[in-house]
Image (cartoon, helix red, strand yellow):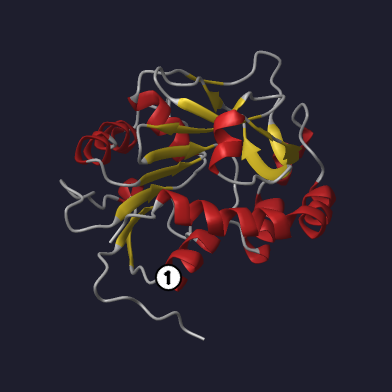
Amino acid sequence: MTPEINKHRRPMLIVLHQERSTPGRVGQILMQKGFALDIRRPALGQKLPETLADHSGAVIFGGPMSANDNEDFVRREINWVDIPLKENRPFLGICLGAQMLARHLGANVYGNKDGSVEIGWYPIRPTRNGRLMMKWPSMVYQFHREGFELPHGADLLAEGDLYPNQAFRYGKHAYGVQFHAELTRMMMQSWVVRGAERFTLPKAQPGHLHLEGRMLHDRALKAWLDGFLDHVFTEAS
């Protein structure tokens, strides 16, 4: 069944970083909520809008690159984050997108000195601010080698063990999350196949645990995502 798009709502800007990347469940849920998706891929030369006046908000997704890279499109995206912040429009950064938000706000993006990564399922804990906001899942899916410092003035919403800053809010409408709630089963299977060489990194989990963990933890993660998107984009139109 095709979701019914609300023609009175402005589209949601979706920023992806590879030719075959999709917005996964984030895109599916936003469409179910009545948003059309305006998908842009700056890494492939597509431009981002100079204002979000014609959009309900923006989501920057993850990717294999680093927010510390010197590629022009990475620097442009980090600078572009100033637009939703200045215009007070809803913004969500996921993994790389969260790291770009942190970089824009003056925080460092870093890898752990011991080389440890989060690739697989890992526990998180909501902070007091996070608990006041909503109920959080106890386990989330991760696929990253870098994390971010908490930007000055930001509220930490969830924390973890290997990488302490897992979700934060800046101002009223900007959010960053380190983990991946957007993966469909097909996306996860693809990531497990294409990312298998990373499973030997310190603290990474073998591929079979990714799929087994999905059976145990994904229902709660999906329910959280639905509610979280309502919270982030509650005033979007």
The residue lying furthest to the front in this view is: 132
Q: Residue at x 35, y 77 (%)?
A: 5
Relative to residue 162, is residue 48 drawn left or right? left
Q: Identify the amino acid type marked 1.
A: Met
Q: Quadrant of residue 34?
A: bottom left
How many C-alpha atoms fall within 10 Å of the one at disc 1: few (<14), some, or many (≥20)?
A: some
> Quarter of the image holding residue 200?
top right
Quadrant in the picture for residue 179:
top right
For the residue pair 73 and 217, the one nearer the viewer reads as 217
The residue lying at 67 percent from left, 53 percent from top is 221
Is residue 166 among what the camera can see? no
Q: Which of the pair 45/171 is nearer the observer?
A: 171
Q: Is residue 219 left or right of residue 19?
A: right
Q: Where residue 134 sits: x, y (%)?
A: 58, 46
Coordinates of residue 226 in the picture (x, y in percent): 55, 59
Front residue of 165/224: it is: 224
The C terminus appears in which quarter of the rendering? bottom left
- Residue identified by numbered label 1: 31
Q: Is residue 37 above or below residue 234?
A: below
Mark 1, secondary structure of its residue: helix
**Residue 31 appears at what percent x and percent y?**
42, 70
Taking the spot 26% from the left edge, 31% from the top edge, the residue there is: 79
Question: In this rendering, does residue 186 appear at all?
Answer: yes
- Left or right side of 138 for 57: left
